[in-house]
Amino acid sequence: MPEWVLRRMCESVEGRIHSNIERHCGTYIILTILLVNGCDDPALLEHRIHHRALQPQGIDATITLTWKEIEQAPIGYTAANHYV
């Protein structure tokens, strides 16, 4: 399945997933969906995910990103740029 199709599918449900988790847990969350096909640096991916988990609340409550988008920059930075 082409990456753009997977991305569209994820983007179409990310808001509902986010709302359901927040409602169930009763707290603010950041939902990040990563499509990591083609990732050739698992250590960097782990670092990016860990950094994202420590990130404070931001404007990017839900986002779907690809490995190509986060390979050169942190997830939070890349996600915030999608909203600008």
Image: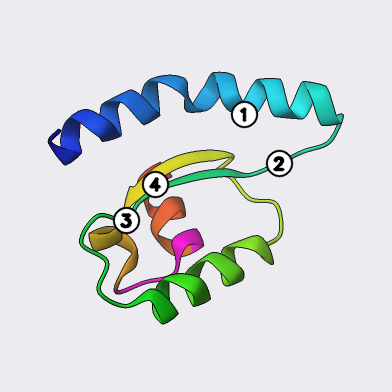
Give the label, 4 or 2, closer to the camera: 2
Q: Earlier in the sequence, mark 4 or mark 1?
A: 1
Q: Secondary structure at mark 3?
A: loop
Identified by mark 4, the residue type is Val
Looking at the image, tell me whether mark 2 or mark 1 is earlier in sequence order.
1
- The percent coordinates of residue 52 (x first, y second) are 58, 63
Q: CA distance from mark 4 to mark 2?
A: 20 Å
Q: Which comes sooner in the sequence, label 2 or label 3?
A: 2
Q: Main secondary structure of the magenta part?
A: loop
Task: Give the label on residue 29, or none.
Answer: 2
Which is nearer the eye, 43 or 70? 43
Q: Of discs 4 and 1, which sits in the foreground?
A: 1
The vertical placement of 47 against 65, above or below, is: below
**Res 70 → quadrant:** bottom left
Tag 2 and tag 1, C-beta contact below 8 Å: yes
Q: Earlier in the sequence, mark 4 or mark 3?
A: 3
- Label 1 sits on residue: 18
Q: Residue under circle 3? A: 36
Give the class, few, some or many, for how many residues have Cα within 10 Å of label 2's Cα (few <14, many ≥20).
Answer: some
Number of other residues with Cα within 10 Å of mark 1, as a class: few under 14, some 14 to 19, many 20 or more: some
- Marks 3 and 1, how far apart in space? 20 Å
Task: Identify the residue shown where x is 46% and y is 53%.
Answer: 80
Three-letter amino acid code at the position of disc 2: Ile
Number of numbered discs overlaid on the protein picture: 4
Q: Nearer the viewer, mark 4 or mark 3?
A: 3
Side of 32 where 69 appears, left or right: left
Residue 83, by quadrant, is top left
Which label lies toward us, 3 or 1?
A: 3
Left or right of 19: which side holds 84? left
Q: Amino acid at mark 3?
A: Val
